[in-house]
Image (tube, rainbow, N blue to C red):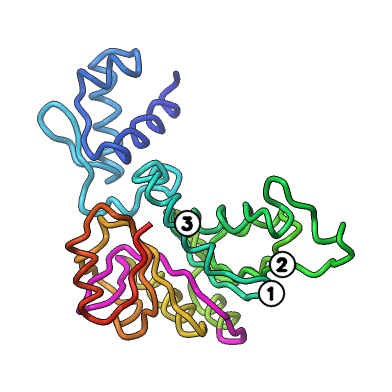
Amino acid sequence: MNQHERHGALLRLLAERGRLDVEAVAVEVAVSAATIRRDLDQLAEQQLLVRTRGGAVQNDVAYDLPLRHRAGRDAAEKERIGRAAAAMVGRGMVVGLNGGTTTAAVARALAARADWGDGEGGLPDAARGDDRPAVTVVTNALNIAAELAVRRSVKVVVSGGVAMPSSYELVGPLAGHILREIRLDIAFVGADAVDAEHGASARDEHEASINALLAAQAGKLVVVADSTKLGVRTFARICPPADIDVLVTDDRAADRARRFEEQGMSVVRA
């Protein structure tokens, strides 16, 4: 395993566990502890982690980890959230998706809908004499667009903009220009934090601005967030709680989810 591969492996393990121990990881990766220490020092210099005595932890800007290194966190919960969200979409709808690991799970669940032809056991719509897409997805996320573009049952519309390296989201005036010209039946918006009093928010103001615009264009706004995001506030607000029609989360923190229900919000626990 070369240095590049080790760095990738260490970031993946850190995203999954939140903390690394030098000696344990050295055994797991099959290199010396000294090599792991040097790797962690180099990653700390890039501000991708924080060195501790004997290892490393995620830092306060862990959201800057590339998306591929965050995908493993809470994967089972996000898969359930994705399926629950995708079940809200009807044939012919125009759907908005912003970037993030949870919305990527929604996109995969949409693509897997067997009743639309691309899922297991289904026939392509063209085989039924209908070449219209089953659903139209509007997204500012490059990874989601790439995953859905090969699906014959999905029409993909991508906003313009400048790509964010950590989230693959397109932001800026070009993205805003496109999004202002469209109307969505439903938008699934992922967030870094969701608070019952403050609403949904993101750590990056550029992403928050575009996500807010995506949310504003939707007839129905669904926030998708695993329970670790609940009861937390971050820097830039995407939308107030009154704008959120449904919150889809997992079932690990019933007390936190209950606070949203007390505010009159519809909550789906996947």
- Tell me the element at label 1: loop
Q: Quadrant of the N terminus?
A: top left
- The front one of 135 and 17 is 135
- The front one of 78 and 150 is 78
Region in magenta: 180-203
Task: Verify CB contact (< 8 Å) between mark 1 and mark 2.
Answer: yes
Three-letter amino acid code at the position of disc 2: Ala
Q: Residue at x 36, y 84 (%)?
A: 243
Three-letter amino acid code at the position of disc 3: Gly
State how far apart marks 1 and 2 are (Cα): 5 Å
Q: Is residue 202 magenta?
A: yes
In the picture of the structure, the residue carrying the numbered disc 3 is 82
- Residue 59 is labelled as none
> Height in image: 206 above or below 22?
below
- Circle 3 crowding by C-alpha within 10 Å: few under 14, some 14–19, many from 20: many
State how far apart marks 3 and 2 are (Cα): 18 Å
**Of the image marks 3 and 1, the number of the one nearer the N terminus:** 3
Q: Residue at x 41, y 48 (%)?
A: 66
- Circle 2 crowding by C-alpha within 10 Å: few under 14, some 14–19, many from 20: many
- The front one of 237 and 32 is 237
- Residue 37: % across, % down: 23, 24
In the picture of the structure, the residue carrying the numbered disc 1 is 92
- Residue 97: % across, % down: 52, 67
Q: Residue at x 64, y 75 (%)?
A: 93
- Tell me the element at label 2: loop
Three-letter amino acid code at the position of disc 1: Gly
Q: Residue at x 27, y 57 (%)?
A: 227
In the picture of the structure, the residue carrying the numbered disc 2 is 134
